[in-house]
Structure formats: structure tokens, C-alpha cells
Image (spheres, rainbow, N blue to C red):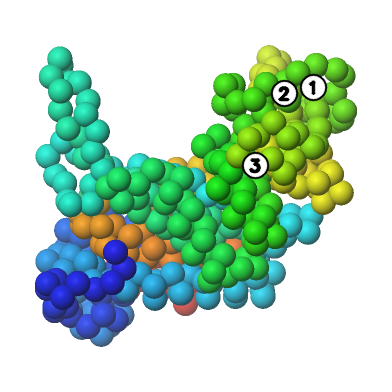
Amino acid sequence: MERLRDDRKKPQIPAARFYKAMFLLFLCRLPSLQALEGYRCQTPLRRFLRGGMPCIDQIANVSETANLHDLRTLLQGFQRQLGRNKVLRDFHGHRLAVVDGHEINCSYKRCCPDCQQRELTVNGQKRIQYYHRAVIFQLVGPGFRLLLDFELLGPHDDEGTAALRLVRRVIAAQPRCFDILLGDGLYPQARFFKLLRQHRKHAIMVLKDERRDLLKDARAVFTSAPTLCYRKGRTTYRCWDEAHFTSWDLYPHGVRVVRSLETHIPPGTTTAVAREWIWVTTLSKDEAPTRHVVLFGHERWRIENEGFNELANYWHANHYFHHHPVSIAAFWLMLFVAHALFHCFLRNLQPVRRRGHSLMHWAELIKAEFVLGLWYFSSA
Ligand SMILES: [Zn+2]
């Protein structure tokens, strides 16, 4: 998918101008290529682009032949720099990463050869819906995160297969960027655990399939009193933690299961909300005590909140900027670049200047600087 195909149209604009245009698209939070084209006559943009704004067709054509390897290499460079600058830091000596799947968009009308499809019943009629899903790899540290890589599912892929490709690629390119992989209830699969242990990495995955012998065995053991109770803020934790479970046929090396019953009292209320979490992990108790496994397990939510939700609600990532498999991956990887730069910029602002302003306030100022030439940051 990443290779150029000879039958594709030749780029009509220099690659540098194309990447700058895509960078503008995301950094200015524009919803579409049409919106970007609407700024063709803006002088500050012409200066930035060193030429005129490409038209929609030019951007779409070039995006189909974008070099995804180069975009991934750029993000890997960010990761190394953020690590050197102590921006992306460890959690209690561990580097955490999250992998999760996401459906980008769906349609009954528009499709490409790489679309996945499903049959749905609408108003009593069976219809074929076309959609794309992708798997995303995010590094998470205290106070910062980096969306590092993206893998589009092929027409016949399942999420696990694409995620395995993605994790293999990340390990090959940056073997030291993480040592614990977090995943939801889809990821306690032997193929992930074997791959991770082969590279001396660990997994913490949500365990929620009640049909599994492993979960049945863990529940049978967790009937006694909790092994650890503690309180943090408005949440009380009661935890059970047992190792050496060997009832997982496909991964009989012994795993540890941690259960956390959490009672949280939301601010402004007196009603407690109870939730149960169970994780399966390859970490020993010496490598991560119960409290740390619970803390790490909850970091998985950051790919939902800081990843998918932010990208869909504030970066217009819930549609295709151009419907082509290479273009979709290129736009998302470029989005990751813009997302990383934006959050680095915010992090470097003095707290006194940042206070009281929303993320969108700064996004609008950046847009004003690029599009209208209001040099707020350079003159302030
Ligand atoms: Zn498609």
C-alpha cells in the first residue's frame, strides 16, 4: 500500500508545497480541502507556501502517491526529540503505549477498492455499507502524548491483524520507544503477548470476555478479601492481584490478573459510582506493584480522550479529506504531525498566558497568524 503505483497520476505540484498545504489544513483546523482552497489569495499563505495554494485536485492527486514511510520517519524523529527533551517521560520507570482501532467514516454510496463492507438492514431492506477502520499507536507519558503511527485495515483485515502489523513496524523502527503496551478487551490475544514477550516488552490488556477460562478462574480466586485497598482523590480502590494463571491454552506461560473495584464520587454529588476493571498482564509483581498496574491500565483511556475524541471533535478527522487508501493514511499521519506540534507549542507557552484560554482559542490564533498575517505571537 505504501509503494507508488505506476498507473497513478504524476504530482502536479512540488512535494514540499503539498506537505505545507496539508500542514496548514490541520494546523488551521480547516474542515476540508475546499476550505483550504478558499484561502488561495491570502498573501501570508503564499509566502509560507513559496507559491500559490494548490487546488483540490492537485492536493488529492499528490496525496495518493504520498510517501508514508517519510511521514512515519518524521513522527519517529519527534518521538526521539521529545524523549531527549524529557517531554515524553516514563511512568514509574515504564514507557507506555496504547493501541486501539477506530472507524473513520462510512457510506452507502462512496467506496474504493480497499473499503471494508458490511450488510445492514435499513427500513427492512438489506444494504451494503462501505467503511474504513484504522488502528492507531499512541505513546503516553505524564502530561504529554504522541500519536506515533497509523495502520489502515485492508478490505479483509480484522483489527487484530492490522494492529499486529502496526506494533511490529513500531518495534522494528523504534524498539525502545515503549516497554508496556495497553489495549482494550479485543487485545488479550496470544499473538500480541507472544510478540511483546519476544521483544522483552509487556502487555496490560483489559480482560472482559466472560466466556474465557482465564476470567472464570480469576473470578473464582477473587472471592476472598481484596489484597489492597487505597484512596486517591474522590476514588476508592479495592484490588485483587494474582499471578501464575495458566488456564489460557494459547499462552500457557502464566499471566497475572489484576481486578480493581472502584467507587468514585463525582464532584458536586454525594452519589457514588462503582466500576469494575480487570486486566491481564505479563508484568510480575516485582516489575509493577498492583497500584501501578491499575494506574497504567487507566492510561489506556487517553487514546480515546486525547486521541480519537480530540481528533474527531477539534481536527475534523471524522471524514475523508480524499477517499483513497494512501491518501487517508497520509492525511492522518500529517494530522499526527500537526497535533504533536500544536501540543508542543501549548506546552511551551507560559502558564500565565495559557490560563483561562481554551485549546480552540490558541487554534484560532494560529489560524489568524497563518491566514491573515496577524503576527500575534511574534509581536506579543
Ligand atoms: Zn474506501
Gap in angstroms between the C-alphas marked 1 and 3: 20 Å
**In this figure, which residue is indicated by the disc labeled 2?**
217
Judge left or right: residue 158 versus residue 351.
left
The quarter of the rendered structure image containing the N terminus is bottom left
**In this figure, which residue is indicated by the disc labeled 1?**
221
Which circle, 2 or 3, is nearer the viewer? 3
Q: Position of residue 293 (x, y in %)?
A: 75, 42
Judge left or right: residue 172 versus residue 292.
left
Residue 125 lies in quadrant = top left
Residue 55 lies in quadrant = bottom left
Secondary-structure class at tag 1: helix
Q: Position of residue 54 (x, y in %)?
A: 17, 73
Secondary-structure class at tag 3: loop
Identify the residue shown where x is 25% and y is 57%.
325
Q: Give yes or no for contact between labels 1 and 2 (Cβ–Cβ under 8 Å).
A: yes
In the image, what residue type sits under mark 3?
Answer: Tyr
Residue 327 lies in quadrant = bottom left
In the image, what residue type sits under mark 2?
Answer: Asp
Sequence-earlier tag: 1 or 3: 1
Secondary-structure class at tag 2: helix
Q: Position of residue 303 (x, y in %)?
A: 53, 47
Q: Position of residue 181 (x, y in %)?
A: 62, 51
Gap in angstroms between the C-alphas marked 2 and 3: 15 Å
Q: Residues within 10 Å of mark 3 (few under 14, many from 20)?
A: some
- Res. 64 mark: none
Gap in angstroms between the C-alphas marked 1 and 2: 6 Å
**In this figure, which residue is indicated by the disc labeled 3?**
251
Q: Ligand 1 within 8 A of label 2's CB? A: no
Image position of 286 with respect to 199: above or below = above
Sequence-earlier tag: 2 or 3: 2
In the image, what residue type sits under mark 1?
Answer: Val
Q: Residues within 10 Å of mark 2 (few under 14, many from 20)?
A: some
